[in-house]
Image (cartoon, rainbow, N blue to C red):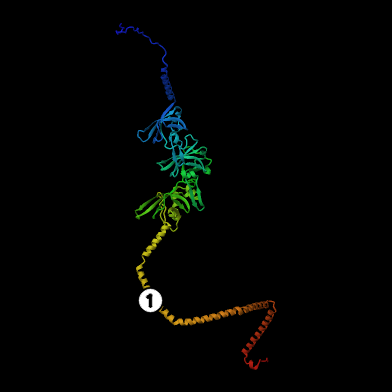
Amino acid sequence: MPDDETGATRPTGASEPRIVEPRRGRPSLVWGIPLAAALIGLALVVNTLAQRGPTITVSFASADGIQAGTTKVKYRDVDIGSVTDVALSEDRSRIVATIDLVQRAESFAVEGTRFWVVRPRFAGSGITGVGTLLSGSYIAVDPGPSDTPETAFVGEEEPPVVASDAPGTRFVLNADALGSLDIGSPVYFRGIQVGQVERFSLDPDRNRISLGVFVKSPYDRLVTGETRFWHASGVDLRMDASGVTLRTQSIATILLGGVAFETPTFASHAEPAADGHAFALASDRTAALKAPDSDPQTLVLHFPQSVRGLSIGAAVDFRGVEIGRVRSMNVEYDTVSGAFTARVVADTYPQRLGGDIETFSRQATPEERLAVLADLIDRGLRAQLRSGNLLTGQLYVALDFFPDADPVSFDPDSEPPELPTVPSDLQELQNQVQTVFRKLARIPFDTLAEDVQGVMAGLESTLARLDTVVAAVERETLPDVGRVMTGLASALARLEALADTLNTAVLPELARSGRALNQTLGTIEDSLAGDAPLQQEARQALRAVSEAARSIRTLTDSLERNPEALLTGRPTDG
């Protein structure tokens, strides 16, 4: 068996092996598949890097509705990015979402851009984000007006009411209280909704509420520097001498509250107010449209009685005209008298009385005002608490003249000046009642009781004696009274018979006599006429009587001189 080159024994009859050289040619197509995949992947990476925009971070209070790799970022329902990571902030107070924006969304990464999570929300203005129940929550964007790049943002917890690019103007309203206003509350002009409340915050320095409102174009041109804003929330129900007045803007204001504005006629042609102009928010339309007040005249009032029912903001009234409000109240201790008094500070506006008083109040110096106030106090000007509502017990401060009030000294140097007070009508009544009771307490009721008992004993003795006398009278006079009553009855019967006789016989005859008497009187009147014959005969008779009377007087005189003439006769001459 021959050996081969390696020293191994080769079997007998085996052919000698041949060395075959491999062929050199093109690579196999199998290698093209991974190469193509690598090229496609590289192209996708290059394309992704080419389309990828800036990476930004947005912090939120919670990660509710946000998931890394799932939550999209949309602007007007167009995808402009996605959330790639969600993590806690370093202080663990918020979550930070990392967002990759697409290249065409680079303009969103600027200062002023707002981000918020769109999810189902239930509020008084309605239900929003219902569509996300099926599609899932997403992050919405409102681009800012700036061109300055920004990569870190603070997300909004509530959706913005108005888009930043909406045409219109934003204003600031300063109010004492928020009331029923909320984000999204409507803004009205003559009953038409022209805007909304965008935000509100507490101004810690001024202790007031600052509201941001948006008035859309073209209604924003109706707002001038003299425009008045007021609360239009709920229902304004007023009862006065003219009847019942019910005022409301709409059903929405009852539920959500609202703001209304109006520009006075004298300022309707003024230039529109600039963006960010601040206005005061009045409590109602009446307060908003009244003439603006100048600086108030602050007064201090000291009331010795309780001020229960008087509240801060209560009216200060002068004969039915409201001229101010109560600013503050507290209790003071008078070390001289040792008594507690209620100290009330009130802001008054005398110019509200109108006429010459308004002119003087606006033009006078503080010294002139104090001089007039001192003169009014000398004439009896005083402050008094009065009841404004008998049901609720609310009080108000009334200023009026009391000529009988005790004179007081006025200190013009006190700051603020003090206006004297008089007790209220109720307090005066209480004082009078207390005075009456004090007088009653001084009456010696014990002594009076003994005197009354003595009088009653004497009265009882007198009544006993009177009973004895009455009994004796009854015994002695009752029989005679019976006889008298019998005779009286008989006399009454005869009187009735006589009356019947008068009615049947005498009265007709009396009527006939009356008629005859009338005829006789007529005849007498005719006879007494100036040209009647009887008058002529009477005059002749009177003349004859006169002549006879003269003859008798002559005879009498003659007899007085010559009484013997009755015997001898008339003497003859000669």
Of 286 and 302, the residue lying toward us: 286
Instruction: Give above or below for 35 relative to 250.
Output: above
Instruction: Give above or below for 186 relative to 570.
Output: above
Q: Quick one: which residue is furthest to the front in this view?
A: 13
Of 99 and 569, the residue lying toward us: 99
Left or right, 552 with reference to 167: right
Q: Can residue 150 be seen by looking at this rendering? A: no
* Residue 380 pos. (x, y %): 44, 56
Instruction: Give above or below for 404 relative to 364.
Output: below
Numbered circles on residues, count: 1
Q: Residue 306 sits in which quadrant?
A: bottom left
Disc 1 crowd rating (10 Å Cα; few below 14, some 14-19, many 20+) is few
* Residue 419 pos. (x, y %): 42, 52
Say which amino acid is labelled 1: Ser
Left or right, 506 with reference to 470: right
Q: Quick one: which residue is furthest to the bottom in this view?
A: 568
Of 32 and 555, the residue lying toward us: 32
* Residue 176 pos. (x, y %): 43, 44
Q: Which residue is mark 1?
A: 461
Q: Can residue 358 be seen by looking at this rendering? A: yes
Of 51 and 519, the residue lying toward us: 51
Residue at 46% across, 27% down: 104
Q: Quick one: which residue is furthest to the left in this view?
A: 7
Q: Quadrant of the N terminus?
A: top left
Residue at 60% across, 78% down: 503
Q: Quadrant of the C terminus?
A: bottom right
* Residue 441 pos. (x, y %): 36, 64
For label 1, the SS is helix
